[in-house]
């Protein structure tokens, strides 16, 4: 066995559940599945986890950045962590031709992936984005970097695996990740039983449930147990975020999560479009129920193309060129192969307040939560 193979490592065989839009140098060219993209997604979820455990003030942020850098690296320099303790590698197990994104204009999936469709701007035709169509199999390897202290390497590997668990159940990869794009699942691997029979099963890592029950109520309990375990392992502080945090954190006080779904929500090439249409139609109706200016809470800037108009933020808020939606919509695969919807609402400060401004926008979180409660068979994840 080589020295590298004796280092702590975890291989995660994965599979896409929804189209993966992951452009390279040319965003409208062929998708490129790169380790840097996966590492970036893992960083986001690690920071969300640690921010919910330690807080978002300057002292907490310094500790979070230290742990993030020790796990995934940072630019060098005096006092910097430098190279990561964990190396992320991608193994592509199938070369399938990317497909141009096409969908009926009035469908729910077209609404979710509207910016991926062909368009026209300034008298120029913009082609459709290309995607890796599901199910697309690949694997990621999380490996300790040679020369790193073994104990430190294991701790960093544990953080990376926990981030991967959050990514698979709550998030996605690439463009439109907050709107079902690039949803992933852990592929089952052959497991030999005591009688010698071989059956496919999803492995367990760090006692986390990578395969969920197909029943939303039970799946919500499993996610709650996993989140509580992550917060316990990270030594979460009960008073970590006494005030509304400035960015997305997995804190029960400031982040609500729901699981939902129908029995007929199957995965695979034919199953996911039905699920995406249902979720997209729900989101479209939810936005339409709000006054136009209040739809800004689903992401900024809010543009109305037909009127050639951009909606300004409420008077108490400063303008920002871009603010992604605080509501993540994703799907995860249950142990029977069906899809479950997952909605994660980060109730952080949406836009910076002007001096003396009231938090006019924040009360909309209550309305969003009420709309989520109307999704089919919805169950909230109680992880406090």
Image (spheres, rainbow, N blue to C red):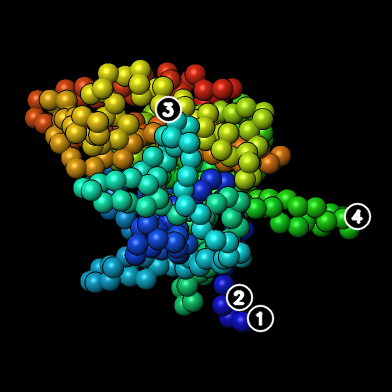
Residue 113 makes an appearance in the image: yes
CB contact under 8 Å: marks 1 and 2: yes
Mark in the foreground, 1 or 3 = 3
Label 1 Cα neighbours within 10 Å, binned few <14 / some 14-19 / many ≥20: few
Q: Residue at x 47, y 52 (%)?
A: 100
Label 4 sits on residue: 195
Task: Bin the neighbour count of mark 4 within 10 Å (Cα to Cα): few under 14, some 14-19, many 20 and up.
Answer: few
Q: Is residue 285 left or right of residue 359?
A: right
Taking depth in this image into account, of 171 and 154 the one nearest to the observer is 171
Frontmost residue, 360 versus 148: 360
Where is mark 2, residue-wise?
Answer: 5
Does the CB distance between marks 2 and 4 fall below 8 Å?
A: no
Residue at horizontal 28%, vertical 49%?
Answer: 61
Disc 2 and disc 4: Cα gap in Å?
30 Å
User: Residue 169: percent from the left, percent from the top?
Assistant: 53, 42
What is the secondary structure assignment of the residue under circle 1? loop
The label number, if any, that marks residue 50 in the structure image: none
Q: Residue at x 35, y 62 (%)?
A: 26
Instruction: Determine the secondary structure under disc 3.
Output: helix
Cβ atoms at labels 3 and 2 below 8 Å apart: no
How far apart marks 3 and 2 lie (CA) works out to 46 Å
Q: Which callout, 2 or 4, points at the residue further toward the start of the chain?
A: 2
The residue that mark 1 highlights is: 1
Is residue 172 at all visible to an observer of this figure? no
Q: Which residue is mark 3?
A: 283
Tags 1 and 3 in contact by the CB under 8 Å rule? no
Q: Look at the image and tell me in which quarter the N terminus lies.
A: bottom right
Cα distance, mark 1 to mark 2?
6 Å
Image quadrant in which you'd find residue 238 = top left
Judged from this view, the residue extending furthest toward the front is 123
Sequence order check: which comes first, mark 3 or mark 4?
4
Where residue 377 sits: x, y (%)? 59, 22
């Amino acid at each position: 066995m080589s020295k590298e193979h004796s280092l702590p490592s975890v291989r995660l065989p994965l599979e896409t559940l929804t189209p993966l839009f992951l452009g390279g140098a040319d965003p409208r060219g062929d998708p490129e599945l790169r380790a840097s993209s996966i590492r970036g997604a893992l960083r986001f979820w690690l920071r969300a986890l640690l921010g919910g455990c330690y807080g978002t003030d300057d002292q907490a942020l310094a500790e979070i950045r230290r742990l993030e850098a020790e796990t995934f690296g940072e630019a060098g320099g005096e006092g910097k962590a430098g190279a990561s303790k964990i190396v992320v590698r991608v193994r592509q197990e199938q070369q399938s031709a990317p497909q141009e994104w096409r969908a009926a204009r009035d469908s729910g999936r077209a609404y979710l992936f509207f910016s991926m469709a062909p368009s026209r701007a300034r008298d120029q035709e913009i082609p459709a984005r290309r995607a890796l169509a599901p199910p697309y199999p690949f694997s990621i390897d999380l490996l300790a970097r040679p020369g790193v202290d073994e104990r430190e390497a294991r701790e960093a590997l544990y953080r990376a695996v926990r981030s991967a668990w959050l990514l698979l159940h709550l998030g996605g990869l690439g463009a439109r990740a907050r709107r079902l794009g690039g949803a992933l699942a852990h592929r089952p691997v052959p497991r030999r039983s005591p009688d010698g029979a071989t059956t496919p099963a999803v492995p367990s890592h760090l006692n986390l449930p990578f395969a969920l029950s197909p029943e939303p109520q039970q799946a919500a309990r499993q996610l709650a147990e996993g989140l509580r375990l992550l917060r316990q392992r990270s030594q979460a502080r009960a008073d970590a975020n006494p005030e509304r945090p400035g960015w997305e954190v997995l804190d029960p006080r400031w982040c609500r999560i729901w699981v939902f779904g129908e029995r007929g929500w199957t995965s695979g090439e034919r199953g996911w479009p039905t699920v995406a249409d249902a979720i997209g139609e729900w989101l479209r109706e939810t936005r339409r129920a709000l006054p136009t200016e209040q739809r800004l809470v689903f992401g900024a800037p809010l543009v109305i193309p037909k009127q050639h108009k951009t909606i300004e933020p409420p008077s108490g808020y400063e303008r920002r060129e871009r603010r992604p939606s605080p509501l993540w919509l994703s799907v995860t695969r249950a142990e029977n192969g069906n899809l479950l919807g997952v909605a994660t609402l980060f109730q952080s400060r949406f836009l910076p307040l002007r001096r003396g401004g009231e938090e006019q926008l924040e009360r909309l979180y209550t309305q969003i939560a009420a709309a989520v409660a109307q999704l089919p068979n919805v169950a909230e994840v109680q992880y406090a």
